[in-house]
Each structure stands twice: as C-alpha cells, then as structure tokens.
Image (tube, rainbow, N blue to C red):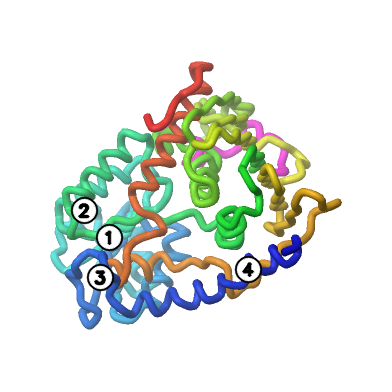
Amino acid sequence: MDRREFLSASALPLAAAAAGAGDAARHPVEGARPSRHPAQEVVRVGLIGAGANVQNVQIPGFRSIQGVEVLAVANRSLASSRRVADQFGIPRAYTHWGELLDDADVDAVLIGTWPYMHRTLTLEALAHGKHVLCQARMANDATQAHEMLAASQRHPDLVCQLVPTSTSYVIDNVLRRLIRDGFLGELLSVQVQRVGRGFPSFDGELDWRHDIELSGYNALNLGSTYESMMRWVGRGTRVMAMAKTHVPYRRDAGGGRRSVHIPDHFDILYELANGAQVHMRMSETTGLSAGNQTWLHGSEGTIHVDAGQSIRAGRRGDRELAEVPNPVEGRAFYRVEEEFVNAMRGLEEVTQLPFEAGVHYMEWTEAVQRSARTGEAVHLPL
C-alpha cells in the first residue's frame, strides 16, 4: 500500500465509529455503573458558577438532552445568580453554593468556577450525594487533584467527569489512527508549539489566568495541550522546563498594579515511555509568530499539523508531505453533557474526561512548574 492509500484508509473507519456513538448512548453498556437515574426519570442539574462557558456551552448542552432540567444556579452573588436564572429561565437562584448543595431536588452539579474552588466543591458535592461535572482545569495543583480522585473513588455510585479540552477534537481521531496503525514507525520525537501572535501587554489587565491564587500551577495552555498529547502518544515520564514572566505586573479591576507569578513563556522538554523526546514551546509574548504547529517524527514517517489544524504527512521515500483526509463525519465532536447524563443513567462510561486523566495532566503541569523553579528534572508520576 502506497502513502496515499495508507492516508486515505486511515480515515475510512472513522465515520462508522462516530455514527456508533449514538447507538451506544441508547443502550446500557456492559461494565457501566448501575444507574441511579433511569432514562425515564428527569435529571435535575445545578450550576455552581455560571460564566461565559457555562452560559454558551453547558446550559445549551444540558437543555438539548431529553429528560434533563437545569434547576438551580449559584453564582458569585444572589444578584448575579438571579440574572442568570432570569436569562435562562432557571427556577431557583441561590446566594451561596452551599444552599444549592442542600437542595435535595438537585441530582448533579456543574462546577463552573475557577480552578481554586474545584476541590472544595467536588468534595462537598459528593458528600451531598451529587454527581459532578467539573470545568477544566481540574484543580490548582496535583495534591488537590488526587484528593478529588480519592473522593470520587469513595463514591462509586456517583459519576465524576471533567470537561475535556476541545482544541484538538478536529484532529484527534485521525492522529490516533495514523499512530496506532504504524504510519510513523517508531515514534522518535515530537515538537509542539502553542504560541500567540501578539506582543507583550505590559501593564495589561490581570485576569484569573494570571492570578496564582485562582489558577494555581495552571498556566497558558499547559494542561490542555498535554491532555491532547496523552490521547495521541501517551504520558510523559520525565520533565525539564524553563519559564519566564515577561510581563511581571498587571492592572487589577481597581486599577492597582499587581505582581504576576504565573509565567507567560515556557520551553519544555519531556520524555515518553518509549524514550521519544517532546519539545514544547508555549508563550503569549511571541509577536507575529508562525502560530501553533505540531510535528511528529518517526522512524518511517512524519506528521505535521499546522495552525489551521490541517494535517500533512509523508513516509520514507517520499519527496514531500501530502494532505491527510479528515472528513467531517469522522471527527470527534463535543458531547460532554450527553456523556455525563448517559453515565448517570448507566448507558455509557465516561471517556472524556475521567478524573484519572485530570490527575495525570495536573501532575505534569506541576512537574513543569517545579522544574522551571528548581532547574532540575522532575520524574512522573509525582
């Protein structure tokens, strides 16, 4: 089989796999947790935190599922809770998240706050007998993530799920199939660039992503990029990193000048289980850069993903890379709320994304920060 036949064949089975997702969601899956919410029962969801992502993605997602009601919301204040409730027709608005968890009619919670609250809210929600869907990133650090996982394991009757990164959905299936089917041969190295095209914003606005108390070790898109990499090539075993904060001060909401302790530029080297090396460059201070790029180099082939997520690939003996077919019907797509509710009903298991995977990306994220701080290699798992 020549290169073009190989590339075309890699895309053919994907449509069938995507089409089968709906069938799996309608019938109980062997090994799925016993259902506490049969399909004929209404599932009532409470929102803790209701920012832009929750309003634009999760609320419509839940409302698109038959037999699901968004029953309650607890935002940063009673006034903001009422604004969201009025806008979306949510029956109950609460002053504090504790009141929502005390509501016996709420079956499950969506945690839409910044990472610093995820551990507390997850543990409290599970203690109140609620299923948990938690926004990314999982937590402020690996210790909190482990505590969340341990709590979920103490409540095996409750579904716990993280909102996965959707930045690589378009290419996930094709890349995984190419790698699995041996297109690369032995994977030798990976180069990943996730950079902006803007120049440094000195004295720019301080948002939660620059605030270490709210974000913890999470910086730029460290965790989401590693999450995608885990899907494609597996987990890392050893990490070395350098980091720089090019914009050391930013303006808070009151106009005050605040120190920033989260780096805005990283160079990272890490090793995979087979010995392949991964070089990542991440930055929000790279004016007029070439943008995002991914190269995967193997003993027999090379795969390149450009800034527009077009995939080109070639094998030994080729003179240039060729476009890889990536039909829309074969791509992964966002269905997080559907998977969460189906898992509650015993119809499928959580794959995107279980708490275990969140622990892995939080450990890696913390390892990057530790290495950058100490100048030493950090081994995984922590």
Q: Which mark is residue 346?
A: 3
Where is the N terminus found, in terms of image quarters? bottom right
**Crowd band around label 1 with a 10 angstrom C-alpha radius: few (<14), some (14–19), many (20+):** many
Is 344 left, or right, of 184 in this rendering? left
By secondary structure, the bulk of the magenta-drawn segment is best described as loop
Task: Give the labeled residue for mark 1.
Answer: 109
The numbered mark, 3 or 4, whose residue comes first in the sequence reads 4
- Asked which secondary structure carries label 4, the reply is helix
Report how far apart the C-alphas of labels 3 and 4 lie in the structure. 31 Å
Q: Which residues are magenta?
A: 195-212
Q: Name the mark nearer the viewer: 4 or 1.
A: 4
Q: Position of residue 368 (x, y in %)?
A: 50, 29
Report how far apart the C-alphas of labels 2 and 4 lie in the structure. 41 Å
Where is the C terminus found, in terms of image quarters? top left
Task: Please tell me whether residue 191 is drawn above or below residue 154 in the rendered image.
Answer: above
Report how far apart the C-alphas of labels 4 and 1 lie in the structure. 37 Å
Q: Position of residue 64 (x, y in %)?
A: 40, 77
- Asked which secondary structure carries label 1, the reply is strand
Q: Which mark is residue 11?
A: 4
Task: Please tell me whether residue 79 is drawn above or below residue 347 in the rendered image.
Answer: above
Rendered residue at 58%/26% (across/down): 243
Q: Amino acid at mark 3?
A: Gly
The numbered mark, 3 or 1, whose residue comes first in the sequence reads 1
